[in-house]
Image (cartoon, helix red, strand yellow):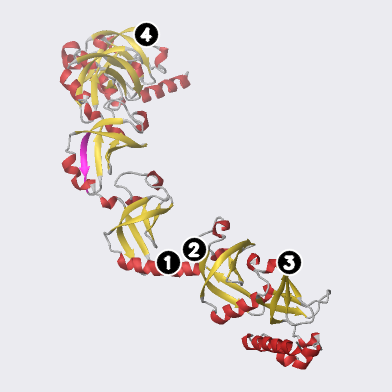
Amino acid sequence: MVGDLATKQEKKTMTTAANAPKSYVDLSATFSMEDLLLGNEQKNDFVENTIISGKIVEKRNDGALIDIGYKSEGFVPATEFRNWEEVQVGDEIDVFLEETENENSMPGISLQRANFIKAWDKITGEFGENSIIKGLMKRRVKGGIIIDLNGVEAFLPGSQIDIGPVKNMDDYIGKEYDFKILKINQDRKNIVVSRRELLEESRKDRRLSLLKEMEVNQIRKGVVKNITDFGAFIDLGGIDGLLHITDMSWGRISHPNEMLEIGQEIEVMILDIDYDKERVSLGLKQKSKNPWDDVEAHYALNSTVKGRIVNIMPYGAFVELEQGVEGLIHVSEMSWTKRVTKAGDIVSVGEEVEAVVLDIDKEQKKISLGLRQKTRNPWEVLAEKYPRGSKITGKVRNMTTYGAFVEIENDIDGMIHISDMSWTRKINNPNEVLKVGEEVEAVILEIDSASQRISLGLKQLEEDPWANIDNLYKIGDVVNGKVTKITAFGAFVELSHRIDGLVHISQISKDHVEKVKDKLALNQDIEARVIKIDRDERRIGLSIKALDEGFSEDDLKAAGEEVSAALKPGEALGDMSKVFDSLDLAKEQE
């Protein structure tokens, strides 16, 4: 019996010593066969913090008793076994001896620590830093994920999980991947790994391979990865290309999301490849022919086209004639009669319109369109309807300092300039003759269709009395009239045929006259003699003192010369501003 025990114990010791790793303890060196037979082994014969062999001698619900050749068995909890249900009595296992006797007088052993040490030794022996190793995403921790490297836990930082930002780490738990070992700390027994570096290296290899395959003008499939204001990034299967917004459509788009959405599969054309910077420029519109190549054949000058208003600016409206081709209707080409200051007052976005092609600039990709050209120019119609010299009747709609605007028809106005309001009077403001809202008759003087101007005349309704002035008045004639204006230098008198004559202050009386108003009054009927007729200046000089019978022809001539010398050219019928100044001066002299 003792011999069998010795033989059994000796075989066990020899087997353990032969198969034990470097950290194993050689029990044959620790105690002799005689000690074993006599039961004299001591706890000091077992080296703590080493791995030793043992056998399962009893399986309980919460764990197993392990015989390590010591005077008492050790206990390993069921949780330390990877497959507890498959554990059988008699199974041999390696355990880590933490202490020869614990508070229960049993050896303190750990299966888990033994497994870790064996796994650590194997991994660090076979794999070094920068090595590739397979691992399982085990659980989340602060800042990253714990990876199971076949018994050894390693740390995967969150920044090293994937190339892009990771929204939910839980999506990776339970999945197996290849990892790159970044750092091994032997003292702390920890390992840091990265998945991102492997992905980037793989991606870089794929990028280089793809770049070699690509050619300019080549059509390739891709997936919309990201959309920005200026364009979209397309994943071409390992390398991203930029599809700029200007290369998406021949037509007008305000944002890439009008044409694309993330995840959409599209075909694009390679426009340019920068091998140094590994950048690819893509085009979508280049897959189809540029519509501007045949624009002149499709849209002839003066032809009528249909389109949709796609954009409105203060200066005009853009009309989409076809995808990629737009024309501009300038505000000046929207109406023949209205003064359009904002295109939005005439058309609106989305409206279908018909317009006339006015001009095409193929190089600048511009087409000028006209909206008003759809109808005949009303100025040309009026020119045909009202030849020069025709009479019209209209309402005074507006007045300026230089004339009055009279509506003719169809919202078209003609202007009566102040110089065409009277043959005989110097009109300084149209309100001296006309009023807004008044119905007047006028003569067509000129219609300028190109400039859209119509000139009207009021005085042309009657003959120019100055054309027959020699038959109306002669030097020395005695005339009657009414005082219409009083100035500091004389009084204006309305004669027959609405011709004004001027009685200069020197011609009122033989005696010296200090103030005109001392001798004459407004609306006073007077009698006077004609002493001067100036055709060029259109003025008649009158004299009251020349009514004296003793006034000879020489006196008449001298009086006329005296008045001409006193008046500057054009002053007799006066610039009204000077007349008003004279009136003010007269008031100051009162």
Q: Amino acid at mark 3?
A: Arg
**Where does label 3 land, which residue?**
60
Q: Are marks 3 and 2 in contact (CB under 8 Å)?
A: no
**Where does label 2 land, which residue?**
163
Work out how far the residue at label 2 is from the one at label 4, CA to CA, in angstroms.
103 Å
Work out how far the residue at label 3 is from the one at label 4, CA to CA, in angstroms.
142 Å
Q: Amino acid at mark 4?
A: Asn
If you read the primary sequence from the N terminus, does the residue marked by circle 3 or circle 4 appear first?
Answer: 3
Quadrant of the image containing the N terminus: bottom right
Using the image, determine if residue 28 lies above or below residue 58: below
**Where does label 1 land, which residue?**
203
Q: Is residue 447 left or right of residue 123?
A: left
Say whether residue 142 is visible.
yes
What's the magenta region? 356-362
- Quadrant in which residue 187 is drawn: bottom right
Q: Is residue 68 left or right of residue 442?
A: right
Residue, x 17% and y 37% (percent of image)?
A: 301
Work out how far the residue at label 1 is from the one at label 2, CA to CA, in angstroms.
10 Å
**Where does label 4 land, which residue?**
523
Magenta segment includes 30: no
Work out how far the residue at label 1 is from the one at label 3, CA to CA, in angstroms.
53 Å
Work out how far the residue at label 1 is from the one at label 4, CA to CA, in angstroms.
106 Å
Using the image, determine if residue 151 lies above or below residue 559: below
Q: Are marks 1 and 2 in contact (CB under 8 Å)?
A: yes
